[in-house]
Amino acid sequence: MAVRILFLGPLADIAGRQELAAPAPLDWAGLLALVSAEVADQIAEDRVNIACGGRVLSDKRTLAAQDGDEVALLPPVSGG
Amino acid sequence: MKSRFCRRSAADSCMALRDVRLVAEPFDSAELVERAFSEVPDTGGVCTFTGKVRGSGGVEALELTHYEPLTLPGMHDLADAAFTRFDLLGLLMVHRIGQMVPGDDIVCVSAAAMHRRDAIDAADFCMDHLKSAAWFWKREKRSDGWHWIEPVPSDHASLARWK
């Protein structure tokens, strides 16, 4: 088991992939170190949200993903 | 996925209809609305908004991506908020996902109420929130390829009306 990281919307284009598996546990610093510098810059912006286990984190710096968790990187929505 | 339930007291004997879904295939808004509300008693008015894919600006296709664990639960939360805020007899909220072409229906929100103001305001409320706060990412295909659509400030201004 590992942590599954999903890149949503335009982040998938920037990352050049839709998902990535990472060893658990995974915290905010670990996530930033894992992705490319360009993706790290993007997800550090306030307008990008992070969900872990299906819940959007109110403070993404508190990320603490465990084995089997899905971490979704959510850029600003473009609406319905 | 359709459920009927009562949100008022039993003495009120209402049957509120609620239909909230994501669909991957083309749909006909008029047919959905007709089918949804034909059996709702005491309906004084139905307000329906249908959003369509525009063909202007050389748009050849539109693709909507979503995130399963958040998108549909978020739409249900929005429906809950609409039922709490407005006096509704029924609410339909259907959203396309995947690829579509100009002319396709993207979204249909339809609210039924005893009085017009609740129906009109509920449809407006749901659309403003779907446009700026629902978990969808949109990209358009034009002759030079795919382009992601960024949120625009007016979407947030629309949302602020309901604060």
Image (spheres, grey):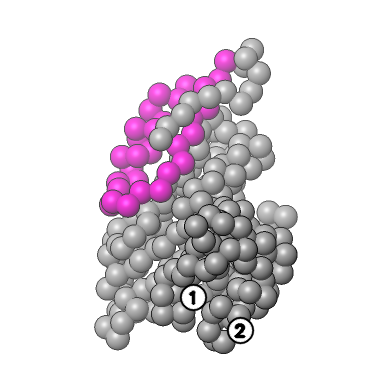
Please state which of residues B18 and B160 is positioned toward the viewer in this rendering: B18
Residue B116 visible here: yes
Please state which of residues B117 and A15 is positioned toward the viewer in this rendering: A15
* Image mark for residue B70: none
Amino acid tagged 2: Asp
The magenta span reads: B13-42
Residue B128 visible here: no
| Identity of the residue drawn at 51% across and 51% down | B69
- Image spot of residue B144 (x, y percent): 30, 86
Horizontal relation, residue A72 to residue A46: left or right: left
Residue B136, compared with residue B94, is above or below; it is below
Whether residues under marks 1 and 2 lie with C-beta atoms below 8 angstroms apart, the answer is no
- Image spot of residue B86 (x, y percent): 63, 38
Amino acid tagged 1: Leu
| Identity of the residue drawn at 46% across and 29% down | B3
The residue beneath circle 2 is A41
- Image spot of residue A12 (x, y percent): 44, 74
| Identity of the residue drawn at 39% across and 63% down | B64
The residue beneath circle 1 is A11
Mark 1 surroundings: few (<14), some (14-19) or many (≥20) residues within 10 A: many
Q: Are marks 1 and 2 on the same chain?
A: yes
The chain that hosts pointer 1 is: A
Residue B37, compared with residue B99, is above or below; it is above
Horizontal relation, residue B159 to residue B107: left or right: right
- Image spot of residue B127 (x, y percent): 53, 54
